[in-house]
Amino acid sequence: MLISRASRAATLAACATFLLATSACGTDQPEEATTHQVRLYGTDGNMLNSYPAELKERANLVDGMKGTTPLTPLPEDFKNRLRTVDPKLGDFLYSAEAYDAVVISALAAQLAGTTDPAAIAKQIVGVTNGGQRCEDPASCLALARNGQDVEYRSVSLTRAGFTDAGEPATASYATLHFDGQQLNDGKTEFVGAGDESAASSKAPPKPKKQRGKAADAPLVLGGLLPKTGDLALANPPIAAGAALALKEINAAGGVLGEPVTWIDGDDGTNPEIAKATVASHVEAGVHVIIGAGGSGISRAVLPEVVKAGKVMISPSNTDASLTEVDDNGLYFRTAPPDSLQGRALADVILRDGPRKIALVARKDSYGEGLQGNVREELERAGFGSDRVKLLTYDPPEDAEAAPVDFTAGAKEIKDFGAEAVLIIGFAESAQVIRALADAGVQIRH
């Protein structure tokens, strides 16, 4: 069941009011047991089974850490299909969004009847709204080849399609829990967010019925995914999702009479590496870029993508401000904006009844954007500036750079008396946890 923004805010406010009186909103733990302990919370950039390895010999510090991520309940069949392209896959974060980004791009090209990026872009929102419902590449491509508009629904797009801005109107979030050094799937909770009425109702250009192989086929997709850098720990499921979609599209006959071509590429979780990859893709004649992994990376390369007239669709960008980015109608995403995740995170934190909360974020559009979203939700729940501390850190510029030094920030959190610490970051955020432990902050398990 969806909860309206007003009723959710009222619920959080009530929780906060009760907390002031009892110090135990959402928990039956006595005050003495929690006064000198801190609970850790994370987000989609670090709530991964691969994350504890970043702490090396102190991996046990994540035990008890909770967090949220955009995630729908993934069917076992989908997970098994992902394992056919990566048998070692241990996480599934953004795998469904990556799969859908590739399928939507392929369907848009088929409906447009051309690989021209501008024509593809005009079809993308319509692929998810208002046509004949279909749920897999084979059936959707068959409809599109026949000149039939489609309404694509799949693993990440289940309730509603894209908004006019080219992003999901609705989303599903999962609350994840580390038990020891592994996420406990048995404790995962799912909650819906967003508004189905926000989905676009604009009609796309009329689909082109396929009559033989298109003159400008094949469709060429270019990866701009975090194979290296701080977000590399999230790359395996994203890459697997994209590879599975490509495999199934081509098994269904490809697009415009030819198999779809994939050119791999790394964003490096680094603007300069990503810009070099974009330049290489433009030179190679890529039509649609799948990526980047991080919101800040997409923001950095988007001017070059737009200048080249290419389509860019990211499976994992969540910075809410990207909704309004100047993109000439060429930027899309299958991941929901953090304006929705901020509410889910606030819910999770407030359930445990902290009196003081520290919000720590990497200093980029993703980290500071989500930090601001959570702060707004806490304000609605009655948490003033005396009960919430905001801190940021500069992420390393590259793999050779010195690790994050959060010594001063950890001392601030200890002196502030925070009982909850939200860490918004990627692999490098493990240094925040190390610094907290080194400062004598007792992490609650």
Image: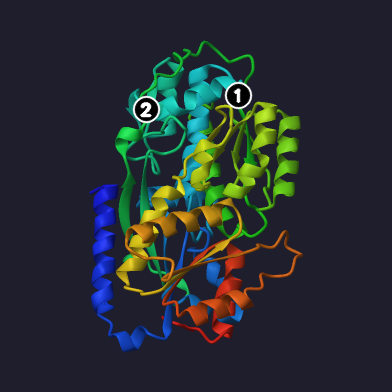
Give me the residue at 63% from left, 51% from top. 226
The percent position of residue 143, horizontal first and vertical second, equals: 40, 21
Q: Is residue 201 left or right of residue 232?
A: left
Residue at the extreme top of the image, as rendered? 211
Residue 276 versus residue 151: which sits nearer the camera?
Answer: 276
Query: Relative to 145, does residue 125 appear above or below in the rendering?
Result: below
Question: Which SS class for mark 2?
Answer: loop
Q: Is residue 52 left or right of residue 200?
A: right
Would residue 437 be seen by someone viewing this image from the given angle?
yes
Say which amino acid is labelled 1: Pro
Give me the residue at 61% from left, 26% from top. 219
Give me the residue at 54% from left, 87% from top. 440
Question: Which SS class for mark 1?
Answer: helix
| Label 1: how many Cα within 10 Å (few below 14, some 14–19, many 20+) | many
Find disc 2 in the rendering and name its residue: 129
The percent position of residue 73, horizontal first and vertical second, equals: 35, 52
Label 1 with label 2: CB-CB less than 8 Å: no
Query: Relative to 219, does residue 83 appear above or below in the rendering?
Result: below
**Residue 419 location, quadrant:** bottom left
Residue 250 versus residue 66: which sits nearer the camera?
Answer: 66
Say which amino acid is labelled 2: Asn
| Label 2: how many Cα within 10 Å (few below 14, some 14–19, many 20+) | many
Residue at the extreme bottom of the image, as rendered? 32
Find disc 1 in the rendering and name its residue: 117
Quarter of the picture holding the C terminus: bottom left
Query: Relative to 360, does residue 215 appear above or below in the rendering?
Result: above
Query: Relative to 289, does residue 349 appear above or below in the rendering?
Result: below
**Residue 150 location, quadrant:** top left
